[in-house]
Image: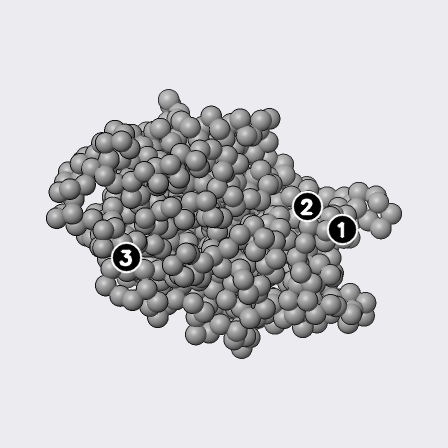
Amino acid sequence: MASISKQIRKSSKLRKKLLATALTLSLVAPVIGPQVGFAQDDQGYTGEEGEATPYAGRGAITTYKVAKAEDQPEIEVATQDRILDIDGKYFRDADGDRSLDGYEDWRKPVSERVADLISKMSLEQKAGLLYINTHTPVADPTDGKFVTDNNSKIVTDKKLRHVIYRLSQNLGDIANYNNQMQQLAEGLELGIPVVITSNPRNSASTDYTNITNVQDQHTFWPGTLGLAAAGDVEAVGEFADIARQEWRAAGIRKVYGYMADVATDPLWARIEETFGEDPKVVGDMNYEIIRGFQTEKLGTDSVAITVKHFPGGGARDDGQDPHFENGRFNIYPTEGSLEKYHIPPFQKAIEAGVASVMPYYAYPSNDSADQGLEPFSETQQFEEVGMTLNEGIIRYLREGLGFQGYINSDSGAVAGSAWGYLVDENGKPISGAQKVAKALNAGTNIISGGATPELVIEAVNTGLVNVSKVNESITYTLSEMMTLGLFEDPYVNPTEAIAASNNEEHRALAYEAHQKSVVLMRNDKIKGKKLLPLTEEKLENVKLYVEGFVGVAAPRGHANPQEYINTESQKQSVGFTADLKNTLTDKFPNIELVDSVEEATHAYVYVKPTQSNWDNNPRIDINETTGVSDVDRIVEIQKTVPTITALNFTNQWLINELEPNAAALIGTFGTLQEAVFDVITGEFNPVGKLPFAIPASAKAVEREVGDVPSFAPEEYKHFTYKTKTGDKYEYGFGLTYNKDNKGKAVGKPDHAGKTGKN
């Protein structure tokens, strides 16, 4: 094994160095849809999610259904003569030949059905099944057609049967979009259905599918950091089960998520999507997410999960993300950190029976400390190629951790972002077919981003990859399709989807999760009494001034991102403030609002810094770069009247200017303002705990290790922010109205320092 330094501190220098019965007629309700095309090398971002509109019923198709009965699954088709009656049992005639083929016979084991189907497929059809790519339907079709001849070429010409849906439409629209896609696939050769996939879509998001708390859309929950802050693992399982019902009803049968990455580099923009920095919490919550979405055993009511990003995307260098070349490697400066801190959540995911795993773009750097894995060679710890192309990393996942599902590449990881495998030793560009062969031979089973099945055909025909590898891969994905019941009934009812989205009990549980996610970080005494809660008695003497400072991220590739941030953040701040006043007037009528600080006795300031992963500029300052251009104004308010300062955390922001003058400090995580004010007024006792430590300063961020949690013995010991009263904003910190400041969850968890290996 190569000689590795036992401790390599993360540094920008290192990064620069490495940059090298009877049929029943059912009318499937109507839809609103999106506008489509497909990218050749898509990293998974559209930037045009659109706004959800109330369900209007457009785009419905007619389907024909045989109801589920004893020893008879539900059969549903868009063409009536696609239903076969064989000895009193009903089957879907997928290929339309009016006879029952082996793969159409639901009585047979899935393995037999899949083998029969593969035997009937051409190489071209098989190659199409090896890809998944973004498909964006018509957003608001006047004719109700979400799926058109032009935008469906990804299915008709390229033969893909896995698509990624990224719009933020209402569930009825999504259901009708699904039905139109399935109707299209039903009429094509072999009748193989479409699997619709999405990133998580039940909370706010900076860079991916983004929703709000509106009618007909998914139930709106706090972000994953908020679920981690709430600390209620059982409730996470409840959330996942509710989300499953909504997704299943709308026809989305696969989740690109959730993230099992551990947040060990505070600069990384994707911390927003994690469950924080504690490997045990990340693992436990992923376990519940998987069991909730997939159910105990994958079946017709399930939504399959693709956990990401193996072997852990949180070990970044200066926050640089491998969507970009300057973040193309994973660095592990701490000996054994990979297995100790980053692998345990994936072990829990495998234990839960996760259907698939997504490796990240990055390659493991040989400048890492010894990670104890089987070495790539006598002189190299790792093969320095992206995880998706990395045979050693994938072998470790399968043989070392016992994973038996399939490997789904990240978008573009086998194309323009195939880090470490773009040019050969002579600097000659590596061909697309070579990249595909490298990925398939390493053990990747489905390629995300782009729609280039012709590269698979070339790789097979030129001997770069054996067709047995192709058959092995599509066996995984076809088995999942059949297990999910898509070969019998890929259609859904938009009316049921809308009902699922508007379930009042589910929305109440989501709201409770928002309340639990609030972290009370500071609560000073004002005239001898704690400022919070502002009880009804206290509110009799309160005149409250409110103002929001809401940062906005620039779209990817914007010509002048800072100008965009300045302009749009100002607009959003004004809009937020107006909406907040309306909300408080409506739901908290006992709070007297005033229009100026001069009139006020108290103030509430909401601060939402924002950074996007897509601008490739990691930063956690609260200033104009994160959309908060007037910190001086916030401090002025804080110094004028006792101010409750609420700060939305998508990252571990530097709070050195914001915290000292706050009379109360509240942490939120995509949390509804009504829930925040439930805590402020004492209607809900704060229970949230920080899902990560807050850094003491920019110097502390520069010195932190990068691949370990803040509470790890290997971390920089002065990392955590400390208030003037002596409170440390460490992992697990959170105040409450009824308990001591240093409750059981404060500080290092009981399992800190323990290895995650079995």
Residue at far right of view: 426
Q: Nearer the viewer, residue 382 or 590?
A: 590
| Cα–Cα span, label 3 and label 1 | 46 Å
Q: What kind of residue is marked 1?
A: Lys
Q: Where does residue 530 sit, x and y in percent of width and height?
A: 24, 54
Q: Is residue 310 left or right of residue 254?
A: right
Binning the other alpha carbons within 10 Å of mark 3 as few (below 14), some (14 to 19) or many (20 upward) gives many
Q: How many marks?
A: 3
Q: Given this view, does label 2 or label 3 mark the residue nearer the observer?
A: 3
Residue 427 seen in this snapshot: yes
Label 2–label 3 contact, CB within 8 A: no
On the image, which quarter does residue 638 sit in?
Answer: top left
Badge 2 local density, few (<14 within 10 Å), some, or many (20+)? Answer: some
Location of residue 595 in the rendering, given as x and y in whole percent from the top left corner: 25, 29
In the picture of the structure, the residue carrying the numbered disc 1 is 17
Q: Are marks 1 and 2 in contact (CB under 8 Å)?
A: no
Give the residue pinned by disc 2. Answer: 326
Q: Nearer the viewer, residue 432 or 632?
A: 632
- Whole-percent x and y of residue 534? 20, 48
Label disc, if present, on residue 686 of the rendered structure: 3
Amino acid at pointer 2: Asn
Q: Quadrant of residue 738?
A: bottom left
Q: Which three-letter amino acid code belongs to the residue tagged 3? A: Pro
Residue drawn where x is 68% and y is 45% of the image:
326
Residue 396 position in % (x across, y down): 63, 68
